[in-house]
Image: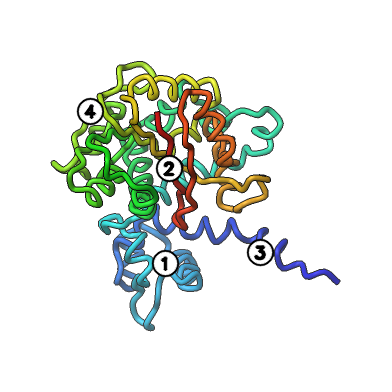
């Protein structure tokens, strides 16, 4: 008989995710080491039920128990504490509060071909008004993007030789992790983030004085001058009409010889993988207008906008790199 392992594993996978989501959302990883009794009091939780959650986290390798107290494992200490410089907690909480209910509407998204903000939350309007619907939601989303950026941006900045550029502007750059990584690798590079005013407000917590912060909308406002623009996890949000408009605007704003560096997950040419990119493409279906693409698809979009010399690099990080020149 065929091994049912993959089916059973997938039936149970959401339970593991939701266990981590709930523990992170409750703040468990920020309050350890502590005894069960102390945690139950601190979290205002039923001690017996909380013990099941904590033991579930032990089983998942996120907590350890010495017979008296629960404490974080190294991976939870690094990625699930809000105060960690490498935290992914923002994206974990965002996944719990936003993506988890939206994925419950996946069938409707597949049938209609549209995102599920209205079905899950009753929200209309531009998609980023939904991502930023409250200051807390905005902060969790941008903190999540920052955590992922720390995992990817150094590899993206290293994927191509950027030594000939002098001024980098990251369009929709959030907390500035990509320009910070590029400026660290190329100290002569002057770097800036150009993002919505709400995002710039949060970016001040992270970018410090090493990256200039400029408020604006890259669809509506003039782009700050640069000889290198970057787009990190931007193009996968939008349909082709909006991508054509944005790439055309970038091409027009660049001097001759200027460059565009893009950070996205690349699908294989036949779109059979890799699995994280396939899952992210479904994620784009439920919460944006866009999708993940192959290098060939990005090359077509870039060449239609006037770019040439399009190259792609698989980085081994959560995001890959694409580069093109005017």
Which residue is labeled 1 in the image? Answer: 47
SS for callout 3: helix
Q: Nearer the viewer, residue 226 or 100?
A: 226
Q: Is residue 29 above or below residue 221?
A: below
CA–CA distance between discs 2 and 1? 45 Å
Q: Which mark is residue 263?
A: 2
Give 232 or 86, whichever is nearer the viewer.
232
User: Spatial distance from mark 4 to mark 2, Cα to Cα?
Assistant: 20 Å
Percent coordinates x, y for residue 295 in the rendering: 55, 41
Q: How many labels sit on residues?
A: 4
- Residue 302 vertical placement versus 86 (above, below): above
Which mark is nearer the camera, 1 or 3? 3
The residue pinned by badge 3 equals 9
Marks 1 and 4, the one that precedes in the sequence: 1
Within 10 Å of disc 2 (Cα), the crowding (few <14, some 14-19, many 20+) is many
Badge 3 crowding class, 10 Å Cα cut-off, few under 14, some 14 to 19, many 20 or more, is few
Disc number lying in front (4 or 2): 2
Q: Residue at x 37, y 44 (%)?
A: 145
Task: State the quadrant of the N terminus.
Answer: bottom right
């Amino acid at each position: 008989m065929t091994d049912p392992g993959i089916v059973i594993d997938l039936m149970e996978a959401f339970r593991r995710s939701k266990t981590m989501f709930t523990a992170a959302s409750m703040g468990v990883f920020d309050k350890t080491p502590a005894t069960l009794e102390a945690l139950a009091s601190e979290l205002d939780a039923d001690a017996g039920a909380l013990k099941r959650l904590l033991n579930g986290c032990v089983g998942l390798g996120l907590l350890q128990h010495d017979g008296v107290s629960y404490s974080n494992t190294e991976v939870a200490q690094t990625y699930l504490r809000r105060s960690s410089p490498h935290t992914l907690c923002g994206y974990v909480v965002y996944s719990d509060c936003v993506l988890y209910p939206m994925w419950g509407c996946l069938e409707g998204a597949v049938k209609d071909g549209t995102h599920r903000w209205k079905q899950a939350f009753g929200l209309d309007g531009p998609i980023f008004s939904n991502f930023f619907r409250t200051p807390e939601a905005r902060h969790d989303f941008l903190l999540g993007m920052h955590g992922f950026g720390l995992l990817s941006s150094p590899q993206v900045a290293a994927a191509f030789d950027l030594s000939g550029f002098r001024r980098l502007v990251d369009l929709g750059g959030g907390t500035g992790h990509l320009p910070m990584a590029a400026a660290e690798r190329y100290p002569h590079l002057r770097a800036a983030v150009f993002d919505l005013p709400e995002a710039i407000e949060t970016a001040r917590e992270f970018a410090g004085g090493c990256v200039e912060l400029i408020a604006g909308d890259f669809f509506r406002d003039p782009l700050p001058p640069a000889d290198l623009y970057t787009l990190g996890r931007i193009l996968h949000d939008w349909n082709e009409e909006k991508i054509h408009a944005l790439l055309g605007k970038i091409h027009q704003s660049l001097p001759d010889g200027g460059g565009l560096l893009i950070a996205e997950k690349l699908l294989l040419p036949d779109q059979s993988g890799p699995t994280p990119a396939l899952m992210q493409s479904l994620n784009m279906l439920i919460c944006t207008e866009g999708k993940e693409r192959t290098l060939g698809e990005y090359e077509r979009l870039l060449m239609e906008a006037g770019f040439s010399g399009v190259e792609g690099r698989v980085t081994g990080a959560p995001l890959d790199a694409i580069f093109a020149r005017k």
